Image: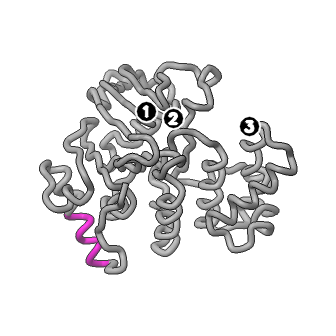
Amino acid sequence: MEALRVRGLTAAAGGRRLLHGLDLEVPAGGAPGARTAVVGASGSGKSLTAAAVLGRLTRGVAATGSVRVGGHEVLGTPPQRRTPASRPSAVGQDPSRALHPLVAVGAQVAAPLQALGSSRRAARTEALELLAAVGLPDPRAAASARPAELSGGQRQRVCLAVALARPGPLLVADEPTTALDVVTQTRVVELLRERTGGPGQPALLFITHDLAVAAQLCGRVVVVEAGRVTETGAASDLLAGAASSAGRGLVAAARRAEAALPARPLVGASR
């Protein structure tokens, strides 16, 4: 079963069409393409697509078509009626908006675990394990801290731990590395590669404007422009010769980034 299947997705607001019959699929973890990137410039419709998958379309945006997560139709389904299997976990660009400023980090990671039936003690233990897994050097200290006491990179790792605490078929990462320095960006990409796409792991829908980052993480890339898919294929094929003008522009930008940061080679991932 595919982790995500989008067919004929349209979206409009204020009489303006924003998405034009968009098709997209992400195979389940363990299959080729289980880490898929949607790449496009600002305003291309990539984040709007992620919002439709997550059920977070803003008021005033009307959408039609089909969005199936884990085999369940989610477009138009009220959040309270969505089963856990149809609720993707999510990591966004701004961790300060995703985390409650007054609640300790450990409690925020433990909350979804308790919601799934873990005891308070078991959830705390598992939360510490997740904080360690995402690379926080002192998980106990991080668990006791409020978000403002951590760096931006550390907060983003906490958001990833929260997402991983919610088991499901799909993790949606919408521009999760944009606001990070290069070193932290590399670590977050490594964590996503380690924790998604494999057998028994959630598949990944990675939203980004940066083809260089997408090529490091995802084996398959979907290029969008003006609310339409312009090409789809292996990251290595796209880098070798993009067919669309949007794809060629993204490759050119990635090549410039590669020249500026030689330690970040443009190589495709295994899935």
Which residues fall within the magenta stretch? 252-260
Secondary structure type for disc 1: loop
Residue sitting at x 31%, y 51%: 220
Q: Quadrant of the N terminus?
A: top left
Label 1 CA crowd tier, 10 Å (few <14, some 14–19, many 20+):
few
Front label number (3 vs 1)? 1
The Cα–Cα distance between marks 3 and 1, rounded to whole angstroms, is 23 Å
**172 in magenta:** no
When the figure is inspected, residue 202 is found, relative to residue 193, above or below; the finding is above
Q: Earlier in the sequence, mark 3 or mark 1?
A: 1
Secondary structure type for disc 3: loop
**Residue 93 in view (yes/no):** yes
When the figure is inspected, residue 144 is found, relative to residue 28, above or below; the finding is below
Q: Earlier in the sequence, mark 2 or mark 1?
A: 1
Q: Earlier in the sequence, mark 2 or mark 3?
A: 2
Give left or right: position of 78 versus 198. Answer: right
Secondary structure type for disc 2: helix
**Residue 105 in view (yes/no):** no
Amino acid type of the residue that numbered disc 3 sits on in the rendered structure: Leu
Amino acid type of the residue that numbered disc 2 sits on in the rendered structure: Leu
Amino acid type of the residue that numbered disc 1 sits on in the rendered structure: Met
Residue 125 in the image, given as x and y percentages of width and height:
80, 56
- Residue 240 found in image quarter: bottom left
Say if mark 2 contacts mark 3, CB within 8 Å. Answer: no
- Residue 23 found in image quarter: top left
Label 3 CA crowd tier, 10 Å (few <14, some 14–19, many 20+):
few
Residue 242 in the image, given as x and y percentages of width and height:
15, 54
Return the mark for residue 1. 1
Return the mark for residue 116. 3
- Which residue is under mark 2? 54
